[in-house]
Amino acid sequence: MSRSAALMEPRTPANLTTMIQIPDCVISRKIAEGGCAEIYEGTDIDTKRKVAVKLLHSRHLNNKTEQKRMLNEGALGMRLRHCPYLVEALKVGKIGERPYIIFEYIPGQTLRELIREYKSMTNVEVVQIASAIGRAVRHMHQAGFYHKDIKPDNVMLDGKGTIKLIDLGFAETVSNLKFSFFGRALEGSPSYMAQELIRSKKPSAGSDIYALGCTLYEAATGQTPFPADSDQGVLEKQCDMTLRPTPVSDINTDISIFTQKMIMQALEKNPEARHKSADEFLLDLARNPLTQQSDRNMKAVGRWVQR
């Protein structure tokens, strides 16, 4: 699913439905486009449910690697579909040589878009995001996969308080049996990559926790932990073991000491000082007084759609 699948303005030609035919699905409009795929809004013919359709871009029709990559992304999404904190994959298939994945449609915004609009999230919102994405990460790790690309672009939120982790395009098995579609020199986004992942290119539970810490830091402060003028500059800062981010509460005074401690530990560059697992991260989160409040109070995370 694209990073802004629920928000892009319609850009669909009038004859779209004659151009793209997805089995058991009626396509209505294009809602996003990335380097490898296009995202369309559609409706499941049988259930009448609104869906999002991710379709390999036509320029990759002869690219067997990208075709395999998308098919495996869909297969992984189907395997993980029962986690309420991961976007639900409904179907994967091909139109000729063009793979597609049908996902649930999330009528909301990405965390990236919310940060741009509000500059930073409140303490309550950051804790709720940490709870949902922490559980999504735990589910993936327990199933034997690392996400590898946790960042604000890949967190979707709606007005009902639903928060989901999306985009499994970089996900990798915990075992050494890698999917064949991974061929990039550096898979992931530099601003969210742990130093050990940059150096070894081997993901771990710890590298996903670090990316989660970077995401929460940005949600709380409106900026990445180690900003720089270029990707290379970011990578150098990520690998500099002497650098530490500015404390969260120095930038956003609404962030409590409990929330700051959780984020800063997730951001430890030494993996031994970081949370060792998603379970350990969630245990730390459980000590936060906000997690003991009612679901009603935590629904504040939906404020931006209620405005």
Image (tube, rainbow, N blue to C red):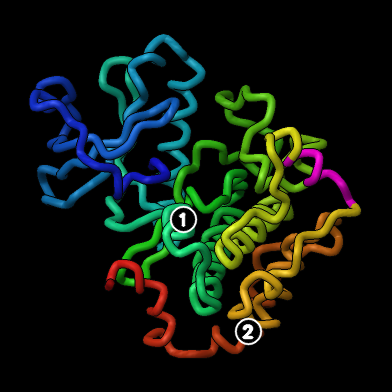
Residue 240 on the magenta span: yes
**Residue at image point 70% right, 82% down:** 257
Compared to 192, does 72 lie above or below? Answer: above
Residue 273 on image: x %, y %: 85, 64
In the foreground, 236 or 100:
236
**Residue at image point 47% right, 21% down:** 66
Q: Which residue is the extreme one toward the top?
A: 62
Residue where numbered disc 2 is placed = 288
Write down the quadrant of residue 220 in the picture: bottom right
In the rendering, which numbered label is found on residue 181?
A: none
**Viewport quadrant of the N terminus:** top left
Residue 8 on image: x %, y %: 29, 43
**Residue at image point 44% right, 26% down:** 35
Residue 117 on the magenta span: no
**Mark 1 to mark 2: distance in Å?**
27 Å
Name the element at disc 1.
helix
What residue range appears in magenta? 234-241
In the foreground, 300 or 184:
300
Does label 1 or label 2 sit earlier along the sequence? 1
Residue where numbered disc 1 is placed = 116
Write down the quadrant of residue 260 in the picture: bottom right
Asked if marks 1 and 2 touch (Cβ < 8 Å), the reply is: no
Q: Please indicate, yes or no, whether residue 71 appears anywhere in the rendered image.
A: yes
Q: Relative to residue 65, is residue 38 drawn left or right?
A: left
How packed is label 1: few (under 14 Cα within 10 Å), some, or many (20 or more)?
few
Q: What amino acid does circle 1 point to?
A: Arg
Write down the quadrant of residue 222 in the picture: bottom right
Name the element at disc 2.
loop
Q: What amino acid does circle 2 point to?
A: Asn
**Residue at image point 73% right, 51% down:** 226
**Viewport quadrant of the C terminus:** bottom left
